[in-house]
Amino acid sequence: TLNVKRNEIERLENHLREEERLLIKSEKNIAEDLVLFDQFLDISNRNASDAASRADEESRRKEELLNEIKQLQKILITYHNDQNHLIDTLKQSCRYQQFLFKFAPEEWRVDILKDLESQCAENRSNDSSIIIEPDTQKTIHENYSLYFTKPEQLLDIFTEMEEKSLPLVQKSQYTCETLDKIHSTINLTINEQNSQVEQLQIKITQLVNLIKHETEHEISCQNLLIQYKNEKDHSSIEQLKQTIEILYKKYIISDDIGISTIHMLQMIENKIKSLFNTIEHMDSSTLVEAEKFREITVRTLEREEKLQQEKLINELKHKKTLLRSSAPPYRKVYIYIYADI
């Protein structure tokens, strides 16, 4: 048993030694791994710092390039603005040049055009393969010296043109004034004609109404004449004669005696015609006022007649009431009816 225990102890000691050896070996491996990991961390830190520095450098360069691009864009925009301004100035100068070319003398213009055409022909003959565009041809035609070298030359031409145009301006003003006068006279004549047309229409309506009234009066007179012819009693004829005499004495002659009734009627008719003629020549406003006055008088007469009739009716009613009140009372008669029972 002792040997067994010794063997067991030796076995355990050997196993412990083996475990210690393995532990030492693993510690060595761990230490080596730690060294390698530290080296890896150092390398990665160096790489990260290098990358950060490179990124900062790249961002700085990028910002510098962007600023440079912005500055170049600003410069380009200013160049474009200057170019547009110069183009506008050139166009305006070309317009002024063309304007001044038109005011130059005819001989000078003909000479300039001939010189420019000869230059264009020489350019075409020198290089036939070159095609001259219209814009370039225009610039060639505009490449000449101005005739006017002093402002006084242009002012002299303007004063001469002003002197020539002054009678034309005066003539146009006179023409405008005459046209205004003609328009005013036309408007006046139109207004006068319109007023005359209105007056004529009023007269036409008045005459139409008068004709209707006369026709109605004629029909009534014919009916009365037929009625008088058919009647045997001549009292109405005498009454008509008396009415005609009253009208004749009142409106024609008051002292004329011994004229027949027909002659009186003719005189009254002539008087009416003369009155109608005077009415036609009278002013429309006067006629309207007279018509209003006649209507007012007719209304007043009708009102007075109505009041007089009402007064007569009231008097008759009053008389009847007085007679009724003064009459003796009626006796009451009682009638008794006896029935056989």
Image (cartoon, grey):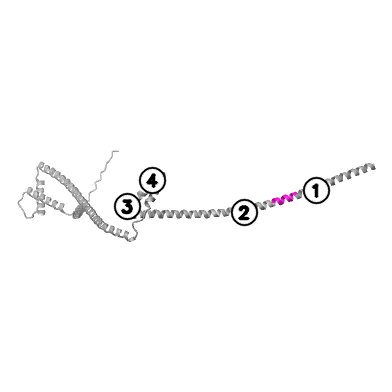
Which residue, as the protein is rendered here, is positioned at the far left? 258
Which numbered disc flags the more N-terminal residue, 4 or 1? Answer: 1
Which numbered disc flags the more N-terminal residue, 2 or 1? Answer: 1
In what element is the residue under mark 2?
helix
Q: Amino acid at mark 4?
A: Ser
* Residue 177 located left or right of residue 56: left
Residue beneath disc 1: 28
Q: Are marks 2 and 1 in contact (CB under 8 Å)?
A: no
Badge number at residue 111: 3
Residue beneath disc 2: 57
Q: Is residue 54 visible to the viewer in this orientation of the structure?
A: yes
Magenta segment range?
Answer: 36-44
Q: Nearer the viewer, mark 2 or mark 4?
A: 4
User: Which of these two is toward me, 20 or 332?
Assistant: 20
Q: Amino acid at mark 3?
A: Asp
User: Which of these two is toward me, 106 or 203?
Assistant: 106
